[in-house]
Image (cartoon, helix red, strand yellow):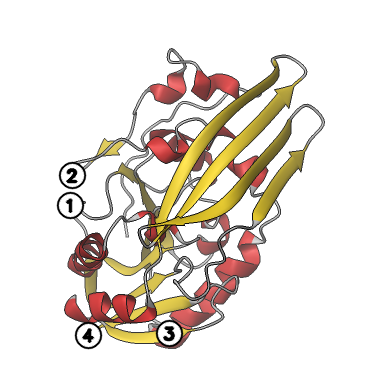
Amino acid sequence: MKRRKRIQFWRPSRSGFCSMNPNCPLRCKRFTLTGNRSRPEMFEHSAAWYDALYSFKDYRREAEILRAGIQQRLPQAQTLLDVACGTAAHHPALLESFQVDGLDLNPVLLELAAPKNPEGHFFQADMTRFELKQRYDVITCLFSSIGYLDSVHALEQACSHFAQHLKRPGLLAIEPWFTPETWKPGKVHMLTHEGPDLKICRMNRSETLNHQSVLHFHYLVGTELEGVRSFEEIHTLSLFSRQEFQTALEKAGFQVDYDPEGLTGRGLYWGFLA
């Protein structure tokens, strides 16, 4: 299959502070825009350090589990769209088996994703309203990104758009966020990264508001060149139930198979579209 011409991306500076600068080229959206978009505020300040913060994740192992699940359910699959792809950390491993494109709402994350998948195409779009010209054998939505949808209606919209962009037969894989039963409010969490010229500490206390989990992150980021900076972000993720996922997927036409372990212990929804 002939691949589309690669669009060049700007790359971040080594310091990582470039996303704080409104004149930084990371603000330049040199990739395909599609659909109506809301402002990706939740990663407004932290996107440039995403890979550093989550460097502990074994993306290759997760991709191998995903690839095995795809092989079992749709062995002929060749093309894959990674929705809410972030910095495309799964792509290097997935590219060993599939042609992979990515879609995300945040422009800075997409800029960081580009070098990991030089032959892929990236779309900046909302997962509830995206409209692409092509269909894929497989669509994935990983690392609990589906939780950023703010309502059951939005979840149903996303599942409907996933179905619209799948070939027949097609396969969907969604890694969910916590459910109302598994979410534990009141706990304090800390995530750190320590590199030779970059130190990061992120702390938060888990909270619940109107059936949503609220993560009020407090960051300290330091480099030798820039010194220490602090900022805050509030991330709100919906606590969808198993039944809400089941219903949303079935309404979109999927046959649903739930794996309680999934890639990281959060579970994995498989949706097959005949």
Distance (Cα) linking label 1 and label 4: 21 Å
Drawn side of residue 93 relative to residue 159, left or right: right
User: What crowding class fits label 4: few (fewer than 14 Cα within 10 Å), some (14-19), or many (20 or more)?
Assistant: few
Distance (Cα) linking label 4 and label 3: 17 Å
| Residue type at tag 4 | Ala
| Residue type at tag 2 | Gly
Q: Cβ–Cβ below 8 Å for labels 1 and 4?
A: no
Task: Name the N-terminal-most of marks 4 and 3.
Answer: 3
Whether 250 is drawn above or below 107: the answer is below
On residue 258, the disc is 3
Whether 29 is drawn above or below 203: the answer is above
Name the image quarter holding residue 59. Answer: bottom right
- Of 50 and 7, nearer the camera is 50
Residue 4: % across, % down: 31, 46
User: What crowding class fits label 1: few (fewer than 14 Cα within 10 Å), some (14-19), or many (20 or more)?
Assistant: some
On residue 274, the disc is 4
Residue denoted by label 1: 131
Q: Quadrant of the C terminus?
A: bottom left
Distance (Cα) linking label 2 and label 3: 30 Å
Residue 216: % across, % down: 53, 43
Distance (Cα) linking label 2 and label 4: 26 Å
Task: Name the N-terminal-most of marks 3 and 1.
Answer: 1
Residue 90: % across, % down: 54, 57
Q: Cβ–Cβ below 8 Å for labels 1 and 2?
A: yes
Determine the residue positioned at 56% across, 67% down. Answer: 63
| Residue type at tag 1 | Glu
Residue 215 visible from this viewpoint: yes
Q: What kind of element bears circle 1?
A: loop
Q: What kind of element bears circle 4?
A: loop
Name the image quarter holding residue 137. Answer: bottom left
Q: What kind of element bears circle 2?
A: loop
